[in-house]
Image (spheres, rainbow, N blue to C red):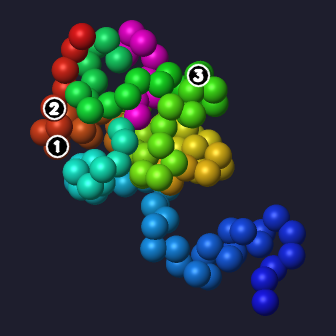
Amino acid sequence: MGYPGPMASFLDRLLRRDPTALPASVRVDRAMTLLDEGAVLVDVREPSEWRSGHAPRARHIPLGTLAREARRLPKDAPVVVMCASGMRSRGAAAQLRAAGYRATSLSGGLGAWRAAGGQVVTR
């Protein structure tokens, strides 16, 4: 027996405990594991922030263009979203989840990535 109305999808997923569901955010160690397993890393910072340094595997899709550029992302792989601190990436990951992607936010953003020894390049 399902629930009527807009809560049905959420409650059905919650009750089924979807094994492919990702949490809303993950720590760097979990993000790195997801990336090693084939997840896509998306950096939603502004172009000037991107140029100052970014993870080498990241795809740059500024937050303001995410709605129209999300089609560049695969729907069959998890997506880890990062920004400078984790604030913008939380909203971006929620936006992607609402569009049908398996997305999560990197908690702590690029600062946490660097602190954990994640590589950063400039171009």
Amino acid tagged 1: Ala
Residue 58 is at least partly visible in this image: yes
- Residue named by callout 1: 116
Residue 12, by quadrant, is: bottom right
Secondary structure at badge 3 equals helix
Residue 94 drawn at (x, y percent): 58, 47
Residue at 58% x, 44% y: name it.
96
Q: What's the distance in space between the residues labelled 3 and 1, CA to CA?
A: 28 Å
Q: Badge 2: how crowded within 10 Å, few (<14), some, or many (20+)?
A: some
Residue 19 is marked as none
Q: Which residue is mark 3?
A: 65
Residue at figure coordinates x 62%, y 42% from the top left:
95
Q: 49 above or below 119?
A: above
- Residue 29: x percent and y percent? 23, 54
Query: In what quadrant of the picture does the N terminus appear?
Result: bottom right
Provide the residue designation for mark 2.
119
- Under mark 3, the amino acid is Thr
**Residue 27 visible, this orientation:** no
**Residue sitting at x 86%, y 76%:** 4
Foreground pick, 15 / 90? 15
> Which residue lies most toward the left here?
117
Residue farthest to the bottom, as pictured: 1
Q: Is residue 36 above or below residue 87?
A: below
Q: Does residue 44 belong to the magenta stretch?
A: yes
